[in-house]
Image (cartoon, rainbow, N blue to C red):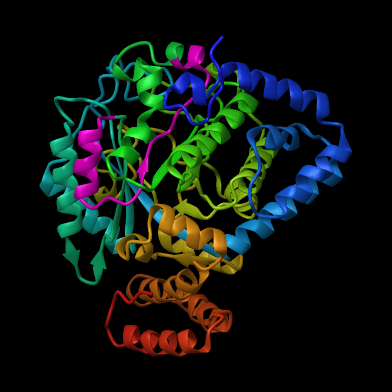
Amino acid sequence: MIKYDPKSLKAEEFINDEEIKETLKYADENKDNLELVDKIIEKAKQRKGLSHREASVLLACEDKERIEKMYNLAEQIKKDFYGNRIVMFAPLYLSNYCVNGCLYCPYHSKNKNIPRKKLTQEEVKNEVIALQDMGHKRLAIEAGEDPVNNPIEYILDCIKTIYSIKHKNGAIRRVNVNIAATTVENYRKLKEAGIGTYILFQETYHKESYEYLHPTGPKHNYAYHTEAMDRAMEGGIDDVGIGVLFGLDKYRYEFAGLLMHAEHLEAVHGVGPHTISLPRVKKADDIDPTDFDNSLSDDMFCKIAACIRIAVPYTGMIISTRETPEIREKIIRLGVSQISGGSRTSVGGYCEEERPHDTEQFDVSDNRTLDEVVNWLMRAGYIPSFCTACYREGRTGDRFMSLCKSGQIQNCCHPNALMTLKEFLMDYASPDTKEIGEKLIEKEIDNIPKDSVKDIVRERLVKIENGERDFRF
């Protein structure tokens, strides 16, 4: 039998099948043990997180009163660590060439329906200008795995191009990277290129299902994929983002595996995941979500989000435009700190006036513009933030985590959010959005703890009015 060891660098030891099965059994046996559930909730109030086993008990518990307590606690923990800020980003699809055979993704190598496309550097430039004209400052670049069409050199060239483009008052200040598992050497190259977070979804932590869902291509190798974050850390990337594609396998198994991965990163590197994403399987070109019989209800999806926030209080949590506006509104209060807006999941999609569907990776369920999403967030009492300061000031990895866990990060993030929102209002917002935003900024300045910082923010807001840009703490 393979032994469970969170400090091991072997995938099947830190994501241990036997340990997950025992965890699920323990959760089933204790889901109605309200005394234990209450103890776990009390422990979670300390903001130090929970083990995968404790969190699995909460997820299994069906007592409505306790679930409401979990939701309220998740909302409060998010406010304690991240305030009422929501960071904005957009995905940028560079290429849909791919050599893998993933059964849930339309980019799989056998799909002859979709036209294959790879952006030239000139096309990358045009996409970036289109994104800048929307108001975006942070991108997550995406590409299929293809060593011939999408080698690391191509990705690095694209990053260089993205950072080089200054259009009117626009600039992409942070590029996160979501590409296939690669080597330590390539992760070093990405780090040297100045990336923000390296993001890689596990898809599923269940090894047997993983190998079935990835029948061909380099992604078939479960261990190589699952151990990618350790190689990224070894290559100097200290901000990594994890996630599973909910709906591929049993959600309780995935939930436990996801938390075990977070525990492993903390145990080995002293830094847990910078972000955890919550995608669900969605319809795409030749992909039907009903082919996978593990779909989960909206209510359970929200419960998973709340339990992740309680279990990993420091992490950023991401919800994308895969979800409808209604679901995003529900789930955002339960711990989400980052969302995409105005997204297009097709290669070259931002330059097209009409949203193209022929090269989409998945159907977008929230089709609102970035301005509309910003407007909606502010009406709901959130501050849309375009801040990228932590990464640019070197507040990454353990430095970010120590500031986040102590609550000190708010002294930087709240003022930075207000100043970057002001930039958006001046340069990109509709009149209605601008009016709401100006009132929100005036109100939120009072929530800055230090008077000296308040004074600096007020001075800088005037400078932004007068055309200056890119202030940060």
Left or right of residue 268, residue 311 in this image: right
Residue at 52% over, 55% down: 337
Q: Position of residue 210 (x, y in %)?
A: 46, 17
Magenta stretch contains residue 204 = yes
Which range is magenta? Answer: 182-210
Residue at 18% over, 31% down: 150
Q: Nearer the viewer, residue 23 or 217?
A: 23
- Residue 214's quadrant in the figure? top left
Q: Is residue 202 above or below residue 197?
A: above
Left or right of residue 116, residue 302 in this image: right
Q: Position of residue 207 (x, y in %)?
A: 49, 16
Magenta stretch contains residue 135 = no
Q: Position of residue 13 (x, y in %)?
A: 50, 21
Q: Is residue 30 above or below residue 80?
A: above
Kindly tell me whether residue 469 is visible in this rendering: yes
Q: Position of residue 448 (x, y in %)?
A: 54, 80
